[in-house]
Image (tube, grey):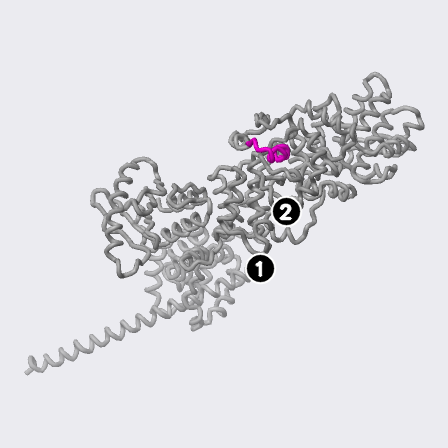
């Protein structure tokens, strides 16, 4: 998704007070000009004080900060909000919202766009910001939302969820509260009495103001998670870089710290020992309370129980819970477990609870989208919501679920965010997880099969070259080197192409190699064989390379391998020379020499074998002859008589 | 072409049926149904030689119809029957065995899911994917 180029290099600059150059990038430029035009309808040169004040208030910064900003930007000095002052002020607002002190130096930092809550008339502008920043399109009318936000800003209730324009680094009160509501699922009431006490009060506050928001995602037992208020305060000082928040902001399958804690608490309620697991039946009862249809729960189980043991360990439980939450909010269940829900990942993640408000964005941005008018009666007309069955599921009129419903509407907003997200199936990962060898006796063979399959692809070890070890009856090296200079150029092309076909045609190759080295001196007894073999080779050998063919034809014409090397060489040379790149001759020569040596050795071995066989035959023939002669002898005296 | 069915005791009603390709299913259904009887027969026959957990059917090779039926039964009397076309170069016995083993593994995975009631039709997507991939491999 396209994160707003808020961090990008400035595309425009505005001169500030004292000649400071205020770098603004395109999104900032756009936003600021929009805001400025709103506050200051042209053709006036200066923004109207009232609209500016309104805008500033909408930024939800404390009033003294706003005063400070106005001072710093120079409006007080010049008495009006000119464009420069306005832009500086906006930048300072952004800085303040990001937690930087209100000073001129702050504006030099790369900042996100300043956030203004629910300015009356510009839904589009408002949404333009998050769209830029997060690539999320919240095309939801927010009439009531605006009203609420106004109410909120008037009340100064920092716990209200922010309207859509929430930067990743949105003001902390909004984000944690909103996204905390996400895991508020499951009217599982009893186990969370503790939490209930804690959060009853802040929740009530939110509750009342959220009447109209009517969060509608699912009937979750609305226990606010973990000290929203305390979190708000604690997080007010924390800011993350936009990059890291951007990284998390588009991943609906990533479990935030808040959620994780919530899940862990839930786990504890079912199974006090965090290192142990929840059995299937217990988990089944638990998740059935979420009122998802059984097939979906079955699928969720399939996804999350990666070791398929019928029980959920803590990370598996978190993943399952997270999937249920997501499903309740209308997200389609993935086919495979997303990478971030994989138990190893979750386990590793749980060891480093780094997530702070950077994580909030993923929910905070979605939440504002979800804050539409939803009523408890579940006429889920969430415009972007497309999961009818989940909305049907939400038809829960239980009283204790009312709060959950509100929460769930917030959660519903998540789908908007998730719509455009592609759950990157680390499908391979999940698949490999599923394919992990499981500790089952009868599956051991399947593991072996898998392993075998894995082993088969590696090619079998290269067939041992037929007998170079036996080589060297002929000192081919010497012979070769004699002709090396003369032949060097000629040999370069053939040797490399000769290599690949070698294993398949080892013998014929070798014999043909013999041809190619006509300067090798063969014992005369082999001349015939060579010539016949040559012919065979010529016929059998696929014409591998033109050079070789040429050589072969040359030698074929010569009919014996014993032609003077020079002739063949010279005949081959003209044929070869054209192919020859003159550069890199030395390295090629070395390679050629080595390959030639090898070939020669092989050829030699083959010939030696041939020789021995022929000798054998010769012996036998001799024996036969002797036998016949003796027979003749035996017969002759009879006749001679 | 091939078809695969899981049927469960005691009445041998099918838990899962999958055919590739999907035409001509009726013929496969008939074949499978008849083969179930043979499977039962075999099970009862080897009462004392404790179930070897797998069996191979080559006996049901009809010369005209040119396909083979393989059977596999688990300890809990759940039967897996596979019909394959003989025209695809005969699958080796080991391949069939490995396929049944994989099926058995996946089946136990399904069983582990607490939301699955034994005796229900099997709707697991993972199982479907596995079966599909296997049948693609066979065809």
The subunit carrying tag 2 is A
Number of the label disc, if any, that sits on residue A308: none
Q: Nearer the viewer, mark 1 or mark 2?
A: 2
Indicate the quadrant where residue A446 lies: bottom left
Residue A287 is situated, as x and y percent measured from the top left of the image, at 53, 43
Outermost residue toward the right in this view? A77
Callout 2: helix, strand or loop?
Answer: helix
User: Does label 1 or label 2 sit earlier along the sequence?
Assistant: 2
Sort mark 1 into few (<14), some (14-19) or many (20+) by Cα contacts within 10 Å: few
Residue A12 is situated, as x and y percent measured from the top left of the image, at 80, 31
Q: Which residues are magenta?
A: A396-407
Q: Is residue A415 left or right of residue B45?
A: right
Q: Is residue B66 above or below residue A45?
A: below
Number of the label disc, if any, that sits on residue A260: 2
Tell me what residue is drawn at x 24 percent, y 75 percent: A622
Sort mark 2 into few (<14), some (14-19) or many (20+) by Cα contacts within 10 Å: many
Q: Are marks 1 and 2 on the same chain?
A: yes
Q: Is residue A123 left or right of residue A521?
A: right
> Can see residue A502?
no
**Residue, disc 1:** A587
- Foreground residue among A164 and B116: B116
Q: CA distance from mark 1 to mark 2?
A: 63 Å
The subunit carrying tag 1 is A
Tell me what residue is drawn at x 63 percent, y 45 percent: A262
């Amino acid at each position: 998704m396209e994160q707003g180029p808020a961090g990008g290099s400035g595309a425009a600059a505005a001169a500030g007070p004292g000649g400071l150059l205020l770098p603004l990038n395109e999104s900032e430029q756009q936003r600021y000009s929009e805001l400025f035009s709103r506050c200051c309808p042209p053709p006036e040169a200066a923004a109207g004080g009232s609209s500016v004040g309104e805008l500033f208030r909408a930024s939800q910064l404390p009033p003294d900060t706003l005063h400070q900003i106005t001072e710093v930007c120079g409006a007080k000095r010049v008495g009006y909000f000119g464009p420069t002052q306005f832009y500086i002020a906006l930048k300072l607002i952004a800085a303040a919202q990001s937690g930087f002190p209100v000073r001129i130096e702050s504006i030099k930092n790369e900042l996100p766009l300043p956030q203004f809550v629910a300015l009356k008339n510009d839904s589009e502008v408002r949404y333009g910001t998050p769209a830029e920043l997060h690539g999320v399109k919240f095309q939801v009318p927010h009439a009531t939302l605006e009203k609420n936000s106004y109410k909120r800003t008037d009340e100064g209730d920092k716990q209200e969820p922010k309207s859509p324009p929430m930067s990743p680094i949105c003001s902390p009160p909004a984000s944690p509260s909103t996204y905390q509501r996400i895991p508020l699922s499951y009217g599982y009431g009893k186990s969370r009495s503790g939490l209930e006490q804690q959060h009853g009060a802040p929740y009530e506050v939110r509750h009342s103001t959220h009447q109209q928001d009517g969060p509608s995602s699912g009937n979750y037992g609305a226990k606010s998670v973990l000290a929203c208020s305390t979190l708000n305060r604690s997080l007010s000082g924390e800011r993350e870089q936009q990059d890291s928040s951007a990284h998390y902001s588009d991943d609906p399958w990533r479990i935030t710290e808040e959620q994780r804690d919530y899940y862990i608490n839930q786990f504890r309620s079912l199974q006090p020992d965090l290192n142990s697991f929840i059995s299937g039946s217990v988990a089944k009862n638990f998740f059935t309370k979420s009122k998802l249809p059984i097939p979906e729960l079955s699928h969720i189980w399939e996804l999350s129980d990666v070791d398929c043991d019928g029980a959920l360990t803590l990370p598996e439980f978190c993943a399952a819970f997270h999937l249920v939450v997501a499903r309740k909010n209308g997200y389609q269940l993935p086919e495979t477990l997303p990478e971030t829900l994989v138990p190893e990942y979750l386990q590793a993640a749980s060891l480093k609870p780094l997530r702070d408000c950077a994580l909030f964005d993923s929910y905070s941005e979605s939440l504002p989208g979800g804050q539409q008018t939803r009523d408890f009666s579940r006429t889920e007309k969430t415009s972007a919501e497309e999961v009818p069955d989940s909305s049907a599921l939400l038809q829960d009129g239980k009283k204790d679920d009312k709060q959950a419903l509100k929460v769930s509407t917030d959660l519903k907003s998540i789908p908007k965010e998730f719509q455009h997200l592609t759950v990157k199936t680390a499908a391979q990962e999940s698949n490999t997880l599923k394919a992990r060898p499981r500790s089952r006796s009868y599956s051991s063979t399947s593991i072996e099969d898998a392993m075998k399959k894995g082993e088969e692809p590696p090619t079998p070890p290269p067939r041992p070259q037929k007998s170079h070890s036996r080589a060297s009856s002929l000192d081919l090296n010497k012979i070769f080197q004699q002709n090396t200079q003369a032949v060097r150029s000629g040999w370069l092309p053939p040797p490399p192409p000769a290599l690949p076909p070698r294993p398949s045609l080892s013998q014929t190759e070798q014999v043909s190699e013999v041809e190619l080295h006509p300067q090798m001196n063969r014992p005369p007894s082999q001349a015939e064989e060579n010539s016949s073999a040559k012919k065979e080779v010529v016929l059998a050998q696929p014409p591998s390379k033109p050079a070789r063919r040429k050589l072969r034809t040359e030698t074929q014409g010569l009919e014996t391998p014993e032609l003077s090397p020079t002739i063949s060489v010279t005949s081959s040379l003209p044929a070869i020379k054209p192919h020859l790149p003159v550069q890199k001759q030395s390295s090629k020569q070395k390679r050629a020499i080595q390959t030639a040596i090898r070939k020669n050795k092989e050829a030699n071995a083959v010939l030696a074998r041939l020789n021995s066989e022929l000798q054998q035959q010769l012996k036998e023939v001799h024996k036969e002859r002797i036998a016949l002669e003796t027979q003749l002898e035996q017969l002759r005296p009879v006749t001679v008589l | 072409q091939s078809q695969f069915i899981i049927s469960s005791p005691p009445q041998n009603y099918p838990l899962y049926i999958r055919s590739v390709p999907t035409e001509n299913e009726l013929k496969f259904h008939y074949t499978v149904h008849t083969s179930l009887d043979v499977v039962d027969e075999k099970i009862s026959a080897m009462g004392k030689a404790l179930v070897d957990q797998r069996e191979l059917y080559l006996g049901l090779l009809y010369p005209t119809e040119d396909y083979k039926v393989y059977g596999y039964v688990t300890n809990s009397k759940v039967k897996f029957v596979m019909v394959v076309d003989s025209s695809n170069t005969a699958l080796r016995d080991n391949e069939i065995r490995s396929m049944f083993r994989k099926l058995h593994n996946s089946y136990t995975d399904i069983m582990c899911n607490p939301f699955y009631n034994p005796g229900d039709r099997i709707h697991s997507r993972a199982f479907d994917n596995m079966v599909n991939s296997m049948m693609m491999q066979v065809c």
